[in-house]
Image (cartoon, helix red, strand yellow):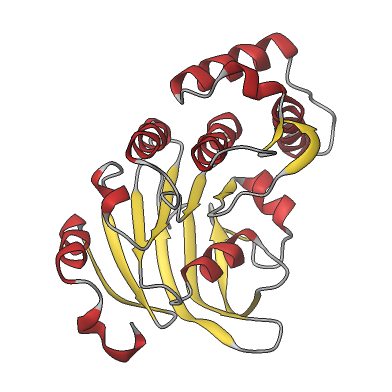
Amino acid sequence: MASLELENLHVALEDGTEIVKGVSLGVDPGEVHAVMGPNGSGKSTLAYALMGHPAYGITQGRILLDGKDVTELGADERAQRGLFLAFQYPHAVPGVTITSFLRSAINAKRKAAAGGKEDPVPIPEFRKDLTAAMEQLKVPRELAQRYVNDGFSGGEKKRVEILQMAMLKPRIGVLDETDSGLDIDALKIVARGVNSLVGPEMGALVITHYARLLHYIRPHHVHVFVGGRIVESGGPEVADKLEAEGYQEYGEAA
C-alpha cells in the first residue's frame, strides 16, 4: 500500500455540487506524481479536500496515510500525521513571525508524535536547521523575523511555503499550483528545494496547469485531471504531450 492512498474519492462543495468524481491514486516516498488539468477541472478542490478543508466535503471514498484512514480527521491532525499542503495563494498571518510559526508547527507535530506529551525542539537545533534550510532555498535571513507572508512578493511566499515543508518534513507534500506567479529564477529555486526533499522519507503530489514546472521537478507519474476525474495516466511523456497539444483532445470537459 502506498504512503498516500486515495480510494474512489468524491468531493462536493457545501451546496452539494460534486467537484471530484471518483479519484483513486497512490503516492509513495521517493515518488513525484503530477496532476495536470485545465482551469476549473477541480485540481485545487482535490488539494484542499486532501488537507481537510471544511468547505470541501468527502462524500464517498477514503484517504489513507501510511495505511491509516484519515478521512474524518481535521487538518491539524492530518498535518501531524505527515500531510503538507503548499498553497497556490499563501495567506498572510500578520503578527506571527516565520520563526515563531515554524517552531509552533514543529512542536505541535513533536507533541503528537510523543502521544500528547510536550517535546519542544531544542532551540539550537531549530536555529541550525532553519539557517540551513533558508540558505538552501535562498530565503533571506531577515525574512525569519517578518510576519508570515505579510507584504511578501509572490516568489518569497512560495519559497517560504517550501521552507515550511523542509522544516516540517512531511510524509507527503501536496503542491497546489506552486508555479503560479513565479518568474523563472524563483521557479528554479523552488523546484530545487522540492527535488532535495523528495526521497526515502517523502513523496510529492504536484498539482499544476502548465508543464513548465515539470521541466524542473521531473515527475515519475503524470495524471490528466479533467472534469473531476483522472482520464489518463502515464510517465513524463504525458506532460510533454500536454505542453505540445493542450487539453483539447479531452473534449468539452476541458
Residue 56 appears in the figure: yes
Q: Position of residue 45 (x, y in %)?
A: 55, 70
Report the side of 208 relative to 231 (left or right): right
User: For residue 95, what is the image quadrant?
Assistant: top right
Q: In front: 152, or 83?
A: 152
Q: What residue lies at 26% left-to-right and 88% top-to-bottom?
A: 251
User: For residue 67, what is the image quadrant?
Assistant: bottom right
Q: In front: 224, or 7?
A: 224
User: For residue 211, what is the image quadrant?
Assistant: bottom left
Q: What residue lies at 27% left-to-right and 51% top-to-bottom?
A: 212
- Residue closest to the far top: 124
Q: Is residue 118 above or below residue 7?
A: above
Q: In front: 119, or 233?
A: 233
Q: Is residue 183 above or below residue 127?
A: below
Q: Position of residue 130 (x, y in %)?
A: 60, 19
Q: Quadrant of the N terminus?
A: bottom left
